[in-house]
Every structure is written in structure tokens, then in C-alpha cells.
Amino acid sequence: MKRRLLVDFVVLEFVGSLRKTDRNFLLMRFAAIRDYPERFCDYRAQDETGRDIDGHIAGKFAIVFWNDSVDRHVKILGVRWADL
């Protein structure tokens, strides 16, 4: 069964403010993370509850996501400009 992709509204606002090429790049990357989240973990941190949250550097963007394996959801929690 395929995972479900859930995206935080703040992420949608950020992505919506970008140029079309950057929007398309991020949407394709979100889909790739949904399909194979374990391939896109460049770093790991913990949220305020102690849960492991994955981070991925995708070009000029840093994507923060949670692979909720119990519910079979991949949750995109944040996107920001990567520190270059």
C-alpha cells in the first residue's frame, strides 16, 4: 500500500510564493519523499515531543518531514531556504 502525503499549510503558502520552476521541483521532491522517505534523510533531529524528524537538503531548499510508518503517512512539516 502506498504512503499518503500530508503537507502542512505553512509549507503550501511557502511553495505557493515561489517561481513555477521551484514549485514544480519541490512538488516532485515531495512525491519522491513520499515514495521512498528512507532515501531522503540527510539529517535527523527531534521535535519538541522527542519524536525523530528527518531533514533533506534538496538543492536550495531544506525539507523537514516525518515518516509516520504506523499510519503510512509522510508528513511534510516545513520547507525553508537551505543555508548555502
Image (cartoon, grey):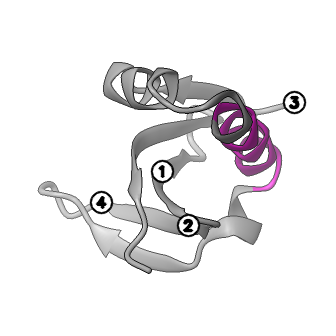
Quadrant in which the C terminus appears: bottom left
Q: How many marks?
A: 4
Q: Secondary structure at mark 2?
A: strand
Residue type (three-letter) at the residue carrying disc 1: Phe
Q: Residue at x 70, y 57 (%)?
A: 37
Instruction: Provide the residue designation for mark 2.
Output: 56
Quarter where residue 14 is shown: top left
Q: Nearer the viewer, residue 60 or 29?
A: 60
Lower sequence index among marks 1 and 3: 3
Lower sequence index among marks 1 and 4: 4
77 relative to 81, above or below: above
Lower sequence index among marks 3 and 2: 3
Magenta segment main secondary structure: helix
CB under 8 Å between discs 4 and 2: no
CB under 8 Å between discs 2 and 1: yes
Lower sequence index among marks 2 and 1: 2
Residue type (three-letter) at the residue carrying disc 3: Met
Q: Secondary structure at mark 3?
A: loop
Task: Using a 10 Å C-alpha cutoff, classify the residue at mark 1 as few (fewer than 14 neighbours), some (14 to 19) or many (20 or more).
Answer: many
Residue type (three-letter) at the residue carrying disc 4: Arg
Q: CA distance from mark 1 to mark 4?
A: 11 Å
Q: Which residues are magenta?
A: 23-36
Instruction: Provide the residue designation for mark 3.
Output: 1
Residue type (three-letter) at the residue carrying disc 2: His
Q: Secondary structure at mark 4?
A: loop
Instruction: Provide the residue designation for mark 1.
Output: 65
